[in-house]
Amino acid sequence: MKNKKRAKKKKKDSIFMKSIKQLDKRLIHMVMFDALFYLALFVILILAFNSLSWNFEAVKEAIPLLDNVVGDLDSGEMSEDVTEKLTELNVLFFIALARTLLILLVIFIASLMVGIFFKGLIWSKILHKKFDIHFYRRFTLFNLIWIIPWSVLIVVLLFAIRTKIVFWYIAGIILIFLHFTNIIYVLFEKEKKFLRILKDTFILGIEKIHYFAVPYLLVALIFLALVYILRLFTFLPWNLYVILFVLVLLIYLSWVRIYISNVILDKL
């Protein structure tokens, strides 16, 4: 019995040490791809903010017209001119709402496509797979089928539940999504059918969930340790500290992907 426990402990240690040893030149690529992804996401958000600001500026132009309508209604007038102004206001606000929804949709699609592209590069490095046009096309379709239903679920919950507890539900859904996403990426094969991958993902993610408890706990503890260690460097100039923090975080995320992928492959 003791020998079996030692063997299991040695196996867990070997998975951990294997993930550390795998932080080779691939780490540079993964950190670079992650950094480029967040940079691209930042650019998308800046462009989105500017677009929304421009849209709201257009709405402000309707305020004088709104004041005129309110003044006419207060005076008891309901002439044809007032009716035309109300129609014009309705059109202006409808256009503004349509533009806002279109901008948000473009933000979502652009962020999703950029994320899929860089995640494909990162996971091709982790799993030693060639990133070619066939891989990217299938990986993109694969992600769209997988991510969109989860996104719709979050949006529905956000509007369906009007209390603060909705954010706890969403946080739980995101954690579940990340758990299954790591598995589904490891199981991804260019030639394997999506339904087969999905079935294997849920079987592994649910039936063997207890095997992930220790790895997830280890990942969380290492994150807390890194945050505590980084607090010791707050004496550095702010810009330098931010660069150090971001670099350590990106290295940590790369290691987490490698470590969890090793845990998943060990349970297949």
Image (spheres, grey):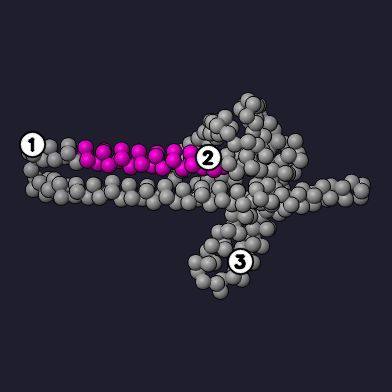
Residue topped by disc 1: 80
Does residue 116 show up magenta in the picture?
A: yes
- Residue at (84% x, 50% y) in the render: 10
What label sits on residue 42 in the rendered view? none
Question: Between 183 and 118, which is closer to the camera in this rendering?
Answer: 118
Q: Amino acid at mark 3?
A: Leu
Amino acid on which the number 1 mark rests in the picture: Glu
Of pointers 3 and 2, the one earlier in the residue sequence: 2
| Mark pair 2, 1: CA separation | 55 Å
Residue 202, x across and y down, in percent: 66, 34
Q: Nearer the viewer, residue 211 or 83?
A: 211
Helix, strand or loop at mark 2: helix
Q: Considering the numbered disc 1 on the image, is that residue within a helix, a strand or a loop? A: helix
> Taken as a whole, is the magenta stretch helix, strand or loop?
helix
Residue 96 left/right relative to 155: left
Q: Is residue 18 visible?
A: yes
Crowdedness near tag 1: few (<14), some (14–19) or many (≥20) residues, C-alpha within 10 Å: few
Look at discs 3 and 2 and give the one toward the viewer: 2
| Of pointers 2 and 1, the one earlier in the residue sequence | 1
Q: Please name the residue shown 53% across and 40% down the image.
A: 117
Q: Which mark is residue 230?
A: 3
Residue 68 point in image, percent of width and height: 12, 48
Q: Which residue is disc 2 drawn over?
A: 117
Q: Identify the residue shown where x is 8% and y is 39%.
A: 81
The region drawn magenta spans 90-119
Q: Amino acid at mark 2?
A: Phe
Q: Position of residue 101 (x, y in %)?
A: 35, 39
